[in-house]
Amino acid sequence: MSAQKQVRRITVPQIAARKGGEPIVSLTSYHAHTAAIVDQYADFILVGDSLGMVMHGMESTVGVSLELMIMHGKAVVRGTEKALVVVDMPFGSYEESPSVAFRNAAHIMKETQCGAVKLEGGKRMAETIRFLTERGIPVMAHIGLTPQSVHTMGGFKTQGRQEAEWEQHFEDARAVSEAGAFALVLEGMVEPLAAEITRRVAIPTIGIGASAVCDGQILVLEDMLGFNPKPPKFVKVYGNLGEQIDQAVKSYAEEVKNRTFPSESQIYR
């Protein structure tokens, strides 16, 4: 009997150790089939609460439930072997108190078998991050443009346009790093600010609409594949999946209408 080579997942300490080293590759994924493709190239895969908008047609991430995150998280873990899988904690699942956050984070990790969770917020969430990490739950932090706070932020606005705002972001980054987060997502942030945060903190920074000098980058998979007709301005589109799907469905519909669709006798002869 030939022994099968066992693939070992990338771990949280391995991601943390990439500070200042080889850039970290990441994408979002929400189901098993795309996760299996992304798994070949990504160091970690984020099951982002952006699935509310991308998969379920919501206007923001605020309406995403814990159950929805767990369902998609299970699918991504099933479809992967190598990448660390990180699952977003949705709005309302961690802000109330550190103990509530722990209960919900533990529920996510038990049900999905993911390797870490991500939550939004800087200094105000430091106590919660410390509470979770001290109890065995790895946390990826997220500051800058935080989509769950879109209503209080007044929309999806680039952060740090005024240098007077920078100190607040420095404090947020310092607080989550010192609280035990193993990595830090910087979203929708002017490049000089994101670059300076990357220089100052001891943990890897993951940019999305931030600086190219972050320790890694992440994009929403559907955005970079051209599936979103109005992707964010910072997204480089690497494919034209939307057009391909449109053409495929159009061709199928035309064959059905023209009765040129393959029949059973043609398929099984």
Image (tube, grey):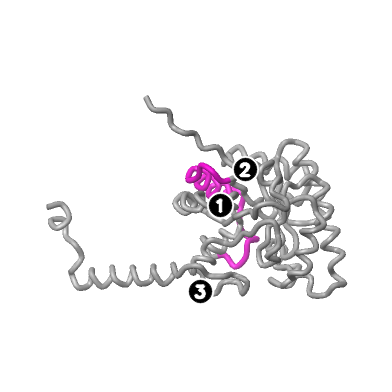
Q: Which residue is mark 3?
A: 229
Tag 2: amino acid: Ile
Give the residue displayed 62% in from the left and 65% down from the top.
60
Tag 1: amino acid: Ala
Give x and y (percent) for residue 40.
50, 49
Q: Which mark is residue 42?
A: 1
Tag 3: amino acid: Pro
Q: Which residue is mark 2?
A: 108
Q: Are marks 3 and 1 in contact (CB under 8 Å)?
A: no
Label 3's element?
A: loop
Measured Cα–Cα span from mark 3 to mark 1: 24 Å
Give the residue displayed 55% in from the left and 37% down from the top.
8
Give the residue displayed 47% in from the left and 54% down from the top.
34
In this rendering, which labeled residue sits more in front, label 3 or label 2? Answer: 3
**Alpha-carbon neighbours of circle 3 within 10 Å: few (<14), some, or many (≥20)?**
few
Say whether disc 3 or disc 1 marks the residue closer to the N-terminus.
1
Give x and y (percent) for residue 83.
56, 46
Magenta highlight range:
58-83
Give the residue displayed 50% in from the left and 46% down from the top.
75
Give x and y (percent) for residue 188.
70, 68
Say whether disc 2 or disc 1 marks the residue closer to the N-terminus.
1
Q: Are marks 3 and 2 in contact (CB under 8 Å)?
A: no
* Residue 47 drawn above or below residue 245: above
* Residue 132 drawn above or below residue 69: above
Q: Indicate the quadrant where residue 121 lies.
A: bottom right
**Alpha-carbon neighbours of circle 1 within 10 Å: few (<14), some, or many (≥20)?**
many
Label 1's element?
A: loop
